[in-house]
Image (cartoon, helix red, strand yellow):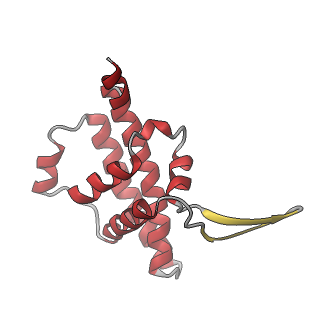
Amino acid sequence: AKISAVTIMAEVGEVSRFKTARQLMGYSGVVSRECSSGERTRRGGITKTGNAHLRRIIVEAAWSYRHRPSIGTALKTRQKTASAEVKEIAWKAQNRLHRRYMRLTAKGKTKQKVVTAVARELLGFIWAIGVTVEQGYGSTASKRAA
């Protein structure tokens, strides 16, 4: 979990450079392809344009949402320094992403498609936590400028 988090943050940099979570999703290439002509719109698989390293690690991290969410002793230790707001977003993400995995699997979607959908939504939660943390502590760029 720590290696994934460090890799994600190294690939993303400052989260605040993305105005919306959708921009971060587009940067990673986990948004659906669109073929439009006139009034007809068709959506396809993911675009795979963008940061391949980020896409690979976020999909790898998304596989963990197959398991029921719980807070073990290791997670409790890591969460001691996190704010209550960040913990709340993280727990909401745990529950929601697990439910999404289970719901899409029950619909008969392939596991790879389900995990990719979960990875896309996970990026939205990462963006929300990143923006919250950067607003709370100030961005690294503003710290360097001071």
Q: Nearer the viewer, residue 133 or 95?
A: 133
Q: Residue furthest top?
A: 146
Q: Nearer the viewer, residue 70 or 146?
A: 146
Q: Give coordinates of residue 116: x percent, y percent.
A: 48, 69
Above or below 49: residue 132:
above
Q: Nearer the viewer, residue 36 or 132?
A: 36
How many numbered marks does the figure carry? 0
| Quarter of image, res 102 | bottom left
Residue at point 28%, 61% (across, down): 69
Task: Say if residue 52 shows up in the picture.
Answer: yes
Q: Give coordinates of residue 120: x percent, y percent.
A: 49, 60
Q: Give coordinates of residue 6: x percent, y percent.
A: 27, 52
Task: Say if residue 1 shows up in the picture.
Answer: no
Q: Left or right? Give the position of 112 relative to 37.
A: left
Q: Give coordinates of residue 90: x percent, y percent.
A: 32, 48
Residue at point 49%, 82% (across, down): 110
Residue at point 56%, 47% (across, down): 23
Residue at point 11%, 48% (across, down): 77
Q: Left or right? Give the position of 132 relative to 104.
A: left
Locate the N terminus and report the quarter of the image it occupies.
bottom left
Above or below 64: residue 7:
above
Q: Left or right? Give the position of 51 relative to 26.
A: left
| Quarter of image, res 142 | top left
Q: Nearer the viewer, residue 103 or 34?
A: 34
Q: Residue furthest right?
A: 38
Locate the C terminus and report the quarter of the image it occupies.
top left
Above or below 65: residue 85:
above
